[in-house]
Image (tube, rainbow, N blue to C red):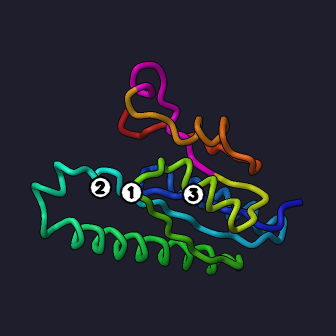
């Protein structure tokens, strides 16, 4: 069935459920697992931000990378602890939307399946926030598993 499963994680309330589902599927199918996290640097590439923080942008990017690597390694340790063959992928861009980065990463890694969480936003909130999951459905070529979750704070 699936031989290469990529799971996209962020640091939201959905992460544990998305990872749990991806790990269970990888165990059931004997698939390799890549845990992927995207750093969206588009805000840091904004000229106004760069002008306000001329000496801080590089330091901020380095802190983001270090934090993201630690986050990925913690999740990879959880997956390995359950007997899954796992690797991590940190992707970043100053120009691409997160969905485009994930599509490219899944294609590059030759994933059979991409597992992502969806926050279940609707209406005007989705319009303003945008939806990575929706863009993946429309633009992606890899099979996609959406793990639905509701914000516990709502």
Of callouts 2 and 1, the N-terminal one: 2
Residue drawn at x 37%, y 72% as measured from the top left:
65
Q: Distance between the Cα atoms at labels 1 and 3?
A: 18 Å
In the image, farthest residue toward the right: 1
Secondary structure under badge 3? strand
Does 133 appear above or below 92?
above
Q: Nearer the viewer, mark 3 or mark 2?
A: 2
Does 143 appear above or below 153?
below
Q: Distance between the Cα atoms at labels 2 and 1?
A: 6 Å
Residue drawn at x 66%, y 56% as measured from the top left:
21
Does 121 appear above or below 24?
above
In the image, farthest residue toward the left: 52
Q: Confirm whether the magenta stretch covers residue 58.
A: no
Residue 144 position, x and y percent, is 71, 47
Of callouts 1 and 3, the N-terminal one: 3
Q: Nearer the viewer, mark 1 or mark 3?
A: 1
Residue drawn at x 53%, y 42% as measured from the top left:
132
User: What is the magenta range?
Assistant: 116-127
Q: Distance between the Cα atoms at labels 3 and 2?
A: 23 Å
Q: Are marks 2 and 1 in contact (CB under 8 Å)?
A: yes
User: What label does residue 94 carry, if any?
Assistant: 1
Q: Which residue is mark 2?
A: 45
Q: Which residue is mark 3?
A: 8
Location of the N terminus (image quadrant): bottom right
Does 35 appear above or below 138?
below
Location of the C terminus (image quadrant): top left
Indicate left or right for 110 with 131 as reference.
right
Indicate left or right for 122 with 40 as reference.
right
Looking at the picture, tell me which residue is in the foreground, 138 or 16: 138
Secondary structure under badge 2? loop
């Amino acid at each position: 069935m699936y031989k290469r499963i990529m799971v996209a994680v962020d640091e939201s309330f959905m992460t544990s459920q998305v990872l749990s589902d991806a790990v269970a599927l990888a165990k059931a199918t004997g698939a390799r697992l890549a845990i992927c996290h995207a750093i969206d640097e588009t805000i840091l590439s904004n000229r106004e931000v760069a002008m306000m923080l001329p000496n801080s942008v590089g330091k901020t990017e380095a802190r983001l990378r270090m934090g993201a690597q630690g986050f990925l390694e913690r999740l990879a340790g959880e997956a390995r602890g359950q007997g899954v063959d796992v690797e991590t992928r940190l992707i970043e861009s100053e120009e691409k939307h997160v969905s485009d980065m994930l599509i490219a990463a899944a294609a590059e890694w030759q994933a059979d399946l991409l597992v992502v969480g969806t926050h279940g936003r609707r209406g005007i909130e989705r319009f303003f926030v945008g939806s990575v999951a929706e863009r993946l459905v429309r633009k992606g070529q890899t099979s996609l598993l959406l793990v639905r979750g509701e914000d516990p704070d709502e």
